[in-house]
Image (cartoon, rainbow, N blue to C red):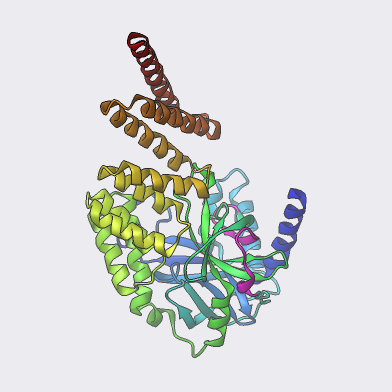
Amino acid sequence: MEEQKDALLQQIFDNNKESTVYLEIEIDDSENFELDSEYPDIITATGFYVEPDKIVTTIAVLANAENVVAFSSNQYETIREHATSRLGKKQNEMDIFPLRQHKNVQINGTEDITIEGVTTYDAKNNLVLLKVTNTGVPLSIGNSDTIQIGDSVYITGYHLEMGYQGRIGYIQGRYGDNIRYEVKTEFITGAFGSPAMNKNNEVIGVATTGLDSDVEDLSTMSTIMVSSNVINTLIANSGNVIPLAQWKKNARVRAYNMESKGDKYADFNYDREALNAYNSARKLNPGLCGIHARIARMKSRLGNYVGALKDFDKAIKENPYDIFSYNNRASTKGALGDLHDMLDDLNQALQMNPNYILGRLNRGQAKCMMAEFEIGDENIAEAQRLYQEAIDDFTKLLRLNPKQTFVRRRLRTVERTLRRLNSMNKKRSLLNS
């Protein structure tokens, strides 16, 4: 079965190549914190043809764009090959990035892809339709009404360092709007705007956002996919071309810019600034996907646990399959001393993904805390049960990742505690007999 899936991915990978476009975006990076980054002002993305002169990509990658350069697959590979040859095979892949610095390479039989502007967009679902000067081969758009939980998904797009890539995933969950889906897959870094295909090589959605909260925890890696029905609506509503500079001034588009600023602040632990940026983004675009969870995380970091709970509730209502929000809401409940409700949220997250490392770690820790309270209330049997369940969680964690030294130490501590508790309980039983 795996061989059949791999063969199908390769077929889709090859078929889609001509229709995909590599986007290199120079962004307004006036608030850049990565002072040691060689190319701090460049991000990459993917687009794909849905009509001979129109491509789809995400709003988020263009909302803060100062300049956009687009390459066909042929141009992309020729330029990379030329740059690699010129720099030497031993050079780091990042040395050929950005590709725009090598754009003077002459490619026979092809023309540069020039983006004229926007013909329409969907600010809630993070999709934009771009008019381009040259023509390409459109991908076939499927009917996303047929999507079922568990269906296989094939995503193809441009990885920042490794070039054109393909990934297999499956539909893990559906948002309440029946437009956005969570796809369990290893997201292709830098490939926002990649087509998500079904087994018939039809586009059933667009990968718009990566959701991997811990790059070392591959079990949690996923992406948000916006359904192909939105693409059909975009095509139907396509109108006059609006220049990118004018389009970016729209308030709901600017919300993505504010969200991006919030992400940067959050990465560098400027929590108050991040919260302000996220609040501004939500005010500009209340339907911005994932914004409730971002605001909730910042409120929790700042100690506003009651406010954080309200926003985590909104995030989970928006996406009932958001295991990260269940885990983060659990931590917030723990900070408020509500350990039983904390455990309920962690159980829910692990029911959806039993291999969720952070969720299992937090559940083990929560059971240890609950056991301590039970000891204080002299409920020894209940404490023993909770400690044993914590041991089971920590043991499972070490099977998933044997290198977690903290978990190993924690496991040994809990095992010693349980042995002492068992011994004390045994002595007490003998004295009472």
Identify the residue at image location x=28%, y=49%: 269
Above or below, comparing residue 43 to residue 162 in the picture: below
Q: Position of residue 130 (x, y in %)?
A: 52, 79
Identify the residue at image location x=54%, y=45%: 219
Quarter of the C terminus within the rendering: top left
Identify the residue at image location x=31%, y=68%: 281
279 vs 319, left or right, is left
Residue 232 appears in which quarter of the rendering?
bottom right
* Range drawn in magenta: 143-162
Q: Position of residue 113 (x, y in %)?
A: 58, 75
Q: Nearer the viewer, residue 19 or 327?
A: 327
Residue sticking out furthest to the front: 433
Above or below, comparing residue 48 to residue 135 in the picture: above
Above or below, comparing residue 302 to residue 426 in the picture: below
Q: Position of residue 123 (x, y in %)?
A: 42, 76
Q: Position of residue 121 (x, y in %)?
A: 47, 79
Residue sticking out furthest to the bottom: 240
Q: Is residue 22 visible?
A: no
315 vs 156, left or right, is left
Q: Nearer the viewer, residue 232 or 88?
A: 232
Residue 249 appears in which quarter of the rendering?
bottom left
Q: Nearer the viewer, residue 119 or 413?
A: 413
Identify the residue at image location x=36%, y=37%: 366
Question: Within the magenta stretch, is there residue 399?
Answer: no
Question: Within the magenta stretch, is there residue 160?
Answer: yes
Q: Is residue 236 visible?
A: yes
Label count reads 0
